Image (spheres, rainbow, N blue to C red):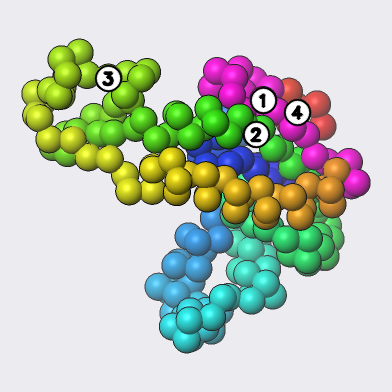
Amino acid sequence: MILILLGAPGAGKGTQAERLVTEYGLVQLSTGEMLRSEVKSGSELGQKAKEIMESGQLVPDDLIIKMISVRISQESDAEGIILDGFPRTTEQAKALDIMLKEKDLRINHVIQLEVNEEEIVERLSGRFSCTDCGMGYHEKFSAPANKGICDKCKSTNFTRRSDDSPKTLRNRLSAYKEQTALILPYYSTKGCLKSIDGMAEMDIVFDEIKKVIDGD
């Protein structure tokens, strides 16, 4: 089974992918992780990718496709694959289909976790954590019992991620929409796209994803 899981920042895509890996014995393939792994290994593909990245250029689609092809072959014992971060364009989607067809494989499901942008901005921009122990909090939903004091270690030092500002989050959401807008019609036409309410409770979202997978 080949699964593509789409979700805007804050949609819970990473959490759901981890649960799917455990539930179905899938392997999650991240293009970023694959590039780092190939470069570190010193493989021929890795050397080419390293040269391209060091020159400040984007790694071309054909090289990414080759890396995915190699990893799929290496994970032949897995029950399936979750693709993370790829494809992002219609051209990439078409190239991916061609490569999979050569292996007698296909994209089984493309699952989009739909979210409300303003709720996502509120959810993420309110996050902060204890600098000392890493305990996570939220200004509105899970603030410390005593304001300014960590529940776990009693520290008064807190950290907020720089990319969790409302402005940055809206920019990230806009970039995501521009990317997915290019590939959603492609997969919709192929009949493998399913949209799920990503704002529902985590367990409900997972159950809906399972219904899509189990109904194949």
Q: Is residue 26 left or right of residue 90?
A: left
Q: Which residues are magenta?
A: 189-209
Which residue carries the number 3 mark?
A: 143
Please report whichever mark, 1 or 2, sits nearer to the chain's N-terminal start.
2
Name the element at disc 3: loop
Estimate the spatial distance between the alpha carbons at disc 1 and disc 2, rounded to whole Å. Answer: 6 Å
Kindly report which numbered mark, 4 or 1, lies closer to the viewer in this rendering.
Answer: 1
Q: Is residue 22 visible?
A: no
Picture quadrant of residue 123? top left
Name the element at disc 2: strand
Q: Are marks 4 and 3 in contact (CB under 8 Å)?
A: no
Task: Classify mark 1: residues with Cα within 10 Å, few (<14), some (14-19) or many (20+).
Answer: some
Which residue carries the number 2 mark?
A: 113
Q: Are marks 1 and 2 in contact (CB under 8 Å)?
A: yes
Kind of residue indicated by mark 4: Val
Kind of residue indicated by mark 2: Leu
Which residue carries the number 4 mark?
A: 212
Task: Classify mark 3: residues with Cα within 10 Å, few (<14), some (14-19) or many (20+).
Answer: some
Count of marks placed on residues: 4
Which label belongs to residue 197?
Answer: 1
Task: Classify mark 2: residues with Cα within 10 Å, few (<14), some (14-19) or many (20+).
Answer: many
Q: Residue furthest top?
A: 145
Task: Classify mark 4: residues with Cα within 10 Å, few (<14), some (14-19) or many (20+).
Answer: some
